[in-house]
Image (spheres, rainbow, N blue to C red):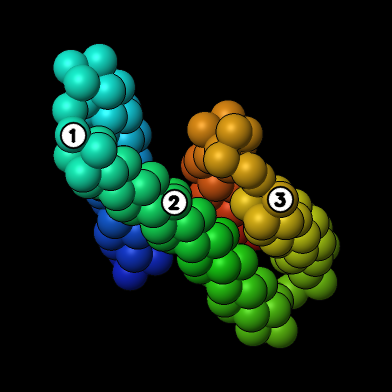
Amino acid sequence: MKTNAKTTGMLLVFSLVVSTVQYSCQSKVKQATKDVQNEYKDVVQAKEKGAEPDKIQEERQELNQARQDYVETWEEERNKIKDEINEGVQRIDQSIARLEQDMQKADANARDKYLKSISDLRQERNQLESRSKDVIAATQATWSNTKRQIRRDIDASKDRINRLVGDAR
């Protein structure tokens, strides 16, 4: 299995960026969730303590703002994952293009390996692309589980792409 240093370096950088984005998104959504919970508690406490209607209304407005912030954070996270999927699809397209170029220079025996890898990469591309539909279809209630599954699929896809490109060469 032969990969060039540029490809390996690009994959390492991409992995670092993805893991940083994953951590950042998880922290933002968790914080937004806590903010909503805390604002809700403030509304309940204000009512229990018999606060003035203006104070209760103020607390409700803060709760509504926290809810809006949560929705925006969740949508931002969904968009980032859609972008990651699109980047993965682009990487596969680039890999296919390189393999097709390399195949032109290869002997007849090696072409079969290239064709097999290219076919498998196209199948991988289709599977990864279909995950975009799952992101779009996810609701806030199903998001956590959907996100976890998609992250696993993206990571597994990267491994398969590396193997397929390496196998062809």
Residue 82 occupies quadrant? bottom right
Label 2 is placed on what type of residue? Val
The residue lying at 64 percent from left, 80 percent from top is 97
User: Does 137 appear above or below 126?
Assistant: above
User: Does residue 150 appear left or right of residue 62 in this picture?
Assistant: right
Sooner in the amino-acid sequence: mark 3 or mark 1 = 1
User: Does residue 39 appear left or right of residue 168 in this picture?
Assistant: left
Label 2 sits on residue: 71
Q: In 3D space, how far apart are the residues under numbered discs 2 and 3 (Cα atoms)? A: 15 Å
Sooner in the amino-acid sequence: mark 2 or mark 1 = 1
The residue lying at 62 percent from left, 34 percent from top is 142
The residue lying at 65 percent from left, 45 percent from top is 138
Q: Position of residue 146 (x, y in %)?
A: 61, 37
Q: In 3D space, how far apart are the residues under numbered discs 2 and 1 (Cα atoms)? A: 29 Å
User: Does residue 71 appear left or right of residue 163 in this picture?
Assistant: left
**Element under label 3?**
helix
- Other residues around mark 3 within 10 Å, as few (<14) / some (14–19) / many (≥20): few
**Element under label 1?**
loop
- Of 154 and 102, nearer the camera is 154
- Other residues around mark 1 within 10 Å, as few (<14) / some (14–19) / many (≥20): few
The nearer-to-camera label among 3 and 1 is 1
Label drawn at residue 107: none
Q: In 3D space, how far apart are the residues under numbered discs 3 and 1 (Cα atoms)? A: 42 Å
Label 3 sits on residue: 137
